[in-house]
Image: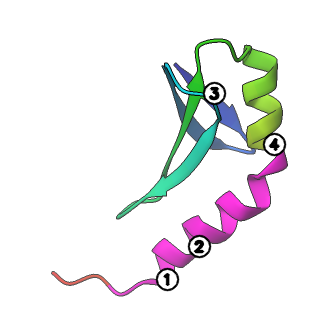
Amino acid sequence: MTIVISGIPIDIHKKNIKNMYIRVLPPDGKVQITAPYSAGDDAIRMFAVSRISWIKKQRANFAAQARQT
């Protein structure tokens, strides 16, 4: 499942876990949220919205890093 917030696509993975986790993956800054099966779509969306400034900062850090060709 994928949601888009502020123009950023976010992949959602549901697992048998207790808490929600968010991560920004190198090298392109792909965003991934891991959520418990019991979490509703609205709760996941609110979690992503509450962390949007952190997501943007992390993506900017990845974009600023020098790449080796």
Q: Nearer the viewer, mark 3 or mark 4?
A: 4
Q: Where is residue 57 in the image (x, y as percent from the top left)?
A: 67, 70
From mark 3 to mark 1, how far is it between C-alphas?
25 Å
Q: Which of marks 4 and 1 is in front?
A: 4
From mark 1 to mark 2, how far is it between C-alphas?
6 Å
Q: What element carries label 1?
A: helix
Q: Which colour scheme is used?
A: rainbow
Residue at numbered disc 4: 49
From mark 4 to mark 1, how far is it between C-alphas?
23 Å
From mark 3 to mark 2, how far is it between C-alphas?
20 Å
User: Of the residues shown, which amino acid type is indicated by label 4?
Assistant: Val
User: Of the residues shown, which amino acid type is indicated by label 2?
Assistant: Ala
Residue at numbered disc 3: 3
From mark 2 to mark 4, how far is it between C-alphas?
17 Å
User: Of the residues shown, which amino acid type is indicated by label 1?
Assistant: Ala
**Foreground of the two, 18 or 63:** 18
Residue at numbered disc 1: 64
Above or below, comparing residue 38 to residue 18 in the picture? above
User: Of the residues shown, which amino acid type is indicated by label 3?
Assistant: Ile
**Foreground of the two, 48 or 60:** 48
From mark 3 to mark 4, how far is it between C-alphas?
11 Å
- Residue drawn at point x = 80 percent, y = 24 percent: 43
Instruction: Indicate yes or no whether the magenta region holds residue 12.
Output: no
Local packing at callout 2 (Cα closer than 10 Å; few below 14, some 14-19, many 20+) is few
Which numbered tag is attached to residue 32?
none
- Residue drawn at point x = 66 percent, y = 58 percent: 55
Where does the magenta region start and end? 50-66
Nearest to N terminus: mark 4 or mark 1: 4
Q: Where is residue 20 in the image (x, y as percent from the top left)?
A: 64, 36
Among all residues in the image, which is located at the extreme front? 18
Nearest to N terminus: mark 3 or mark 4: 3
Above or below, comparing residue 3 to residue 39 in the picture? below
